[in-house]
């Protein structure tokens, strides 16, 4: 049982922007050093790294160890599948610390999409992988682009299914059909998410969209990217890095007055639950209920105990669906919950209080994790009064519950 | 219309594309238990037999979900927008990704009955697509 055996001792992040001058390596180091300084720890004390696997994370363990003069890593592990690694890296770090294999573990995510290609662009990526930075395509002299059978790409790329946003659009269409939503119902729900998150971002100086107001007219009149998703339903594409430092609960409590304890961290993989895994039993089950139940059981808390949630929002639809999967709304009622109750500061559950991937920046959920830590410390820009337990959830049952 | 993104099959999926070129939509099937599935796998996911083959599918199915793409995210797709991506649930159960032929993007609906049609993209490659039936 991991519950309260480990804690977040420090968090760090760089500036987030569409384009930053530094390489992903430089950004990663900046975020990691900031997290270590926040924790009051020296780089030489780091003995573990848990990170997002390549091709998503390109900054390797040796790059970090060399550049920071870390003496020796006793534990390092990588979790695959992009955003689905979020719960995993924290879970691996906590497990390594709880089992005594490491004592100070760094988790990080660094992105320079301005240099390595925007995630939404299928022709700007290189290296293997189902989606994200990864899908190989080779332009041949005859003008054709040939795609191999790895990750079943040959069965969807020729039909123009090449980017994550298109997959989320397929989910949203199916969801609206299964639960009987009109086009206006879906627009109202998704727009409420996008606009509320933008309002949070407008009070968060770190947010890329801090200065940009989003109103209903602008939201509704935005161009359709992939129906039913409009421009503002899709996440930002940016540069930046985030890092957290975990250590034992005792050490964290000795380092600072406001350690944030890990109650539980889960990961999950079912047939075709991975990105572009469109052949599974239920297309729209992004977050398996069994994984959510496991998460709550391990944490020893339930949905009613969660005071703030940072839900992975590659698109606004994922925020809506996560509210169902993690027990805040009944199955098929997340859209109604969002319209009726909202996700704002005065709602039963404030969600994505930093602005989320839609309006703060896109860091594969790691910026949501940092925001949850700030909420539990009481230092968030959009502070939720009395926040003592927070949920950070990524796709496919990858999630973390943190507590004061 | 030129469809410049084409499969570059390996050993596991080559029979699917060879059959498509002959105008047949096929599913991988287990010789042991009869289970059929898509996309191809090295073993039967139900009984784990390694002796698998292919069966011709009826080619009939219904639209399970769809999206109309208005913003091209690959240079090769720039002259195709708006285009439909559909997930078609075959009568046999498995799902496939497809375009929709013979219907305007705004006519596509979930549950729409569709049938496979075969589109020669290059002399070597034929893509199964689906059209209203």
Image (cartoon, coloured by chain):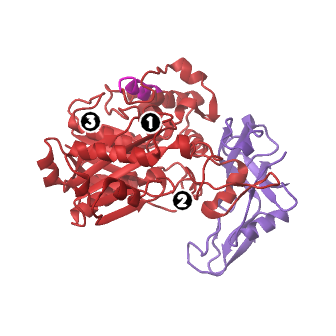
Chain colours: A red, B purple
Find residue B69 and report its image quarter: top right
Q: Which residue position holds label 1?
A: A361
Which mark lies nearer to you, 3 or 1?
1
Estimate the x, y position of residue A270 in percent, counting from the top left. Answer: 48, 61
Q: CA distance from mark 1 to mark 2?
A: 27 Å
Local secondary structure at mark 1: loop
For label 3, the residue is: A375
Q: Is residue A179 magenta?
A: no
Q: Chain of mark 2?
A: A
Q: Nearer the viewer, mark 1 or mark 2?
A: 1
Label ID, residue A186:
none
Task: Pick whichever of labels 1 and 2 is earlier in the sequence.
Answer: 2
Query: Residue at position x 27%, y 50% from top?
Result: A245
- Residue B54, percent from left and from top: 72, 73
Left or right of A156, for residue A244: left
Q: Secondary structure at mark 2?
A: loop
For the residue carrying disc 3, how many other residues have a C-alpha within 10 Å: few (<14), some (14-19), or many (20+)?
many
**Residue A394 is at least partly visible in this image:** no
Question: Main SS of the magenta segment?
Answer: helix
- N-term-proximal mark, 3 vs 1: 1
User: Magenta stretch?
Assistant: A195-204
Going from N to C along the chain, the mark reached first, 2 or 3, is: 2
Disc 2: which residue: A272
Q: Position of residue A84 (x, y in %)?
A: 44, 53
Left or right side of A311 for B23: right
Q: Residue furthest right?
A: B123
Give the camera-side residue of B82 and A70. Answer: A70
Please give the chain letter of the residue carrying mark 1. A
Q: Is residue A198 magenta?
A: yes
Q: Is residue A60 above or below residue B44?
A: above
């Amino acid at each position: 049982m991991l519950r309260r055996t480990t804690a977040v001792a420090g968090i760090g992040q760089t500036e987030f922007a569409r384009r930053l001058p530094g390489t992903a390596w430089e950004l990663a180091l900046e975020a990691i050093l900031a997290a270590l300084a926040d924790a009051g720890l020296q780089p030489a004390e780091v003995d573990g790294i848990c990170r997002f696997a390549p091709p998503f994370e390109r900054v390797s363990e040796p790059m970090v160890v060399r550049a920071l003069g870390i003496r020796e890593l006793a534990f390092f592990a990588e979790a695959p599948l992009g955003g689905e690694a979020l719960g995993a890296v924290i879970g691996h770090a906590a497990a390594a610390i709880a089992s005594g294999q490491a004592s100070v573990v760094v988790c990080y995510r660094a992105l320079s999409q301005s240099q390595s290609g925007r995630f939404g662009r299928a022709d700007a990526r290189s290296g293997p992988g189902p989606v994200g930075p990864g899908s190989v395509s080779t332009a041949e002299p005859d003008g054709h682009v040939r795609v191999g059978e790895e990750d079943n790409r040959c069965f969807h790329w020729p039909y123009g299914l090449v980017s994550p946003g298109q997959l989320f659009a397929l989910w949203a269409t199916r969801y609206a059909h299964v639960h009987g939503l009109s086009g206006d119902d879906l627009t109202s729900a998704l727009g409420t998410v996008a606009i509320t998150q933008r309002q949070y971002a407008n009070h968060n100086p770190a947010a890329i969209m801090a200065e940009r107001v989003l109103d209903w007219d602008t939201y509704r009149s935005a161009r359709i990217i992939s129906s039913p998703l409009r421009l503002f339903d899709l996440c930002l594409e940016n540069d930046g890095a985030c890092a957290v430092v975990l250590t034992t609960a005792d050490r964290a409590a000795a380092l600072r007055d406001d350690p944030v304890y890990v109650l539980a961290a889960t990961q999950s993989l079912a047939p075709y639950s991975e990105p572009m895994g469109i052949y599974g039993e239920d297309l729209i089950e992004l977050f398996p209920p069994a994984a959510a139940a496991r998460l709550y059981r391990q944490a020893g808390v339930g949905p009613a105990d969660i005071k703030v949630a940072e839900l992975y929002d590659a698109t606004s639809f994922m925020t809506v669906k996560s509210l169902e999967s993690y027990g805040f709304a009944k199955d098929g009622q997340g859209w109604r919950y969002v319209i009726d109750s909202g996700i704002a500061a005065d709602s039963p559950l404030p969600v994505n209080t930093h602005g989320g991937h839609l309006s703060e920046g896109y860091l594969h959920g790691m910026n949501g994790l940092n925001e949850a830590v700030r909420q539990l410390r009481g230092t968030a820009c959009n502070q939720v009064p009395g926040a003592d337990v927070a949920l950070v959830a990524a796709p496919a049952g990858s999630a973390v519950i943190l507590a004061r | 219309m030129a469809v410049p993104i084409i499969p570059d099959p390996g050993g596991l999926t080559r029979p699917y594309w060879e059959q498509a070129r002959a105008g047949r939509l096929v599913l991988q099937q287990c010789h042991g238990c009869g289970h059929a599935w898509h996309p191809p796998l090295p073993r039967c996911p139900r009984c784990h037999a390694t002796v698998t083959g292919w069966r011709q599918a009826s080619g009939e199915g219904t639209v399970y979900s769809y999206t109309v793409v208005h913003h091209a995210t690959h240079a090769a797709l720039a002259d195709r927008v708006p285009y439909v991506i559909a997930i078609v649930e075959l009568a046999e159960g498995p799902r496939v990704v497809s375009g929709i032929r013979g219907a305007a993007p705004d006519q596509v609906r979930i549950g729409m009955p569709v049938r496979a049609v075969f589109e020669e993209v290059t002399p070597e490659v034929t893509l199964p697509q689906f059209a209203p039936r």
